[in-house]
Image (spheres, coloured by chain):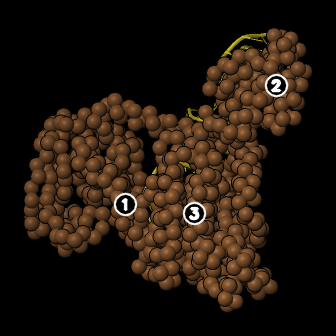
Amino acid sequence: MCEIFLRRLMRKIYPKEDKMAEKEKYEESKLYRLRHSAAHVMAQAVLEKFPEGKVAIGPPIDDGFYYDFDLPRPLTPEDLDEIEARMKEIIKNDSEFIRQEVSAEEAREIFNGQPYKLELIQGLEEGGLDEHGEPVDEKPVISIYKDDTFVDLCRGPHLKSTGEIHPNAIKLMNVAGAYWRGDENKPMLQRIYGTAWLTPKELKQYLWRLEEAKKRDHRKLGRELDLFSVNEEVGSGLVLWHPKGAKIRFLAERFWEDEHIKNDYEFVYTPHIGKADLWETSGHLGFYAENMYAPIEIENQKYYLKPMNCPFHIEIYKTGIRSYRDLPMRLAEKGTVYRYERSGVMHGLMRVRGFTQDDAHHFCAPSQMPEEIDFVLSFSLNMLRSFGFDEIKAYLSTMPEKAVGEPKQWHDAEDALEAALKRAELPYEVDEGGGAFYGPKIDLKINDAIGREWQLSTIQFDFNLPERFDMTYIEEDGQPHRPYMIHRALLGSIERFFGVLIEHYGGAFPVWLSPVQVVIIPIADRHAEFAHGVADELKQAGLRVEVNDSSDRMNAKIRDAEKQKVPFMLVVGDREMEEGAVDVRRRSSERLGAMKVGEFKELVVKEVEEKATE
RNA sequence: GCCGAUGUAGCUCAACGGUAGAGCAAUCGCCUUGUAAGUGAUAGGUUAUGGGUUCGAUUCCCAUCAUCGGCUCCA
């Protein structure tokens, strides 16, 4: 899909309503004041250590706070320990936070020698920008907060005194570089991240949650479960799918394909490169060039690796005269695209340079549009739900200030999108003016098992490309008309989707997606033949089965299967052989006891069909 | 791309200015086992790559590449 050509030009952030309410609630909470206060305490500790240091800003954030500094040397982990220790002393001093309102002139006096603060003061004075560099309407009151020996330019609010911070409920986490005001042309500062909670118990729980998140990190599980790798020899951001990961992908894609066939999609295949002219026509070389790989030159022609599939699908559309009777046309392709990503941004499967989109383009007559939107939204939701994502939220982005196409087109499209959302009874937020310049869109985001939000699907209108490629169809009136075009990706990037899937399930995939569904564990050598017989029977039913006939102890085999997160373990020994049975154990450690092979087979086949999750 | 950290066996980690060691995994045996690790032996590394300093570098310095945590950007 043609995601955001002119995002920087067009993007206007409008606060989203319920996020807004949540944010306000947080900002009024004691926890927020505590974190803000902890940031001040930290800044004092840092300045004591580096008297010549310059302070920038230090707000509370989701799980804690940070503060940015300009310091004479890079901080080390030992420095953090020292700073944290000093913070605890400052807390024990229990000094009061004192607010004072000052004039800009007084503020400049107080923060003489602190260039970042002086810049902030100037911003406040001009009433133009707040501490995040965001525009503000009114000229704000300039306030300072003092505690112990530290004074900071600060809007507040704060705790009554530093003693309200529990010294064992704070922890400095790490140091990172951060640009002053987030601008990469401005100086790089050192940011210290800390976490802070009301009680030591909450801190402990938070650290435990971090550990849990680490355990389900898809990069770690990808290695442990032998799913994929990213290899230095091959190149950064280029994924190697190992047999087990590829098996999961195959199963997911097979389901995806079946669903598309059932829903009147037609599959197409398109090349990985295309001539410069194509990308000129599409506008990519104008707007997207910085994300594209350098051209390949052959016979005096420049070819570019495709960053998107749309131009090819459009060219397929254009190979014939299309009648309104042919529409809607739905062309789908799992198209592999390449986008240049800056070297520091790659992240496992989540952010890569080569990835496959489960892409499709819908071409329809304007009159068909509302129905087409309805269809594509419910199709997306079914797809996501099939993979076990039940918490889905939608984001509707509407016409930005600078946009192509008629406002009427836009509003019709937006209305259709919103109507579809309402019919789907989906919670959604509207990002007014947040659409790309070429059309409004719906993004679908899911919440994973530990509550993190991931964007997967996107459904985007495009009023730009049909124009650029001069696409037409013949209407009832016998005249050529411009079709509507919708880009959509349901899983998004298959690589990224896989990463989310791994983290959502912590590697314990539902049975229908498990690369190995059943491991059979013969207790002694004499049971191996029987075990293989059972395996064959299960394989006949389409199950993915392995027999662990190594000379390991049964316990070791169970441990191994558990670590590989195989959904079912079948122990077979003398008793089972006699009865033609298997002793069933789930990876959840639940023992289902002995059952006939046929009975077990039915159980698993049913779970596969139902796409059951545990 | 930027800031910082890191790069030692397949994995997780030791050690160190005098050319590397453990556990797990692997391989080969022995044991023939009842719901998360039986046991012995063997093999496995130009210490990411390329330079420099040094009598000597895996260790110190520089560059490159990659990874990690962030920033920026984003599917």
Residue at image position (60%, 44%) is A388
B47 versus A313 height, above or below: above
Residue A465 appears in the picture as rendered: yes
Q: Residue flagged by tag 2: what amino acid is it?
A: Gly
Q: CA distance from mark 1 to mark 3?
A: 24 Å
For marks 1 and 2, give the one nearer the viewer. 2
Count neighbours of disc 3 (C-alpha within 10 A) and say few if under 14, some if 14 to 19, many if 20 or more: some
* Callout 1 secondary element: loop
Q: CA distance from mark 1 to mark 2?
A: 54 Å
Task: Name the disc covering residue A374, or none.
Answer: 3
Q: Position of residue A349 (x, y in %)?
A: 62, 52
Q: Quadrant of the C terminus of chain A?
A: top right
* Callout 3 secondary element: helix
Q: Quadrant of the N terminus of chain A?
A: bottom right
Residue at image position (53%, 77%) is A438
Residue B17 picture quarter = top right
Q: Looking at the image, is mark 2 or mark 3 earlier in the sequence?
A: 3
Which residue is the site of mark 1? A16
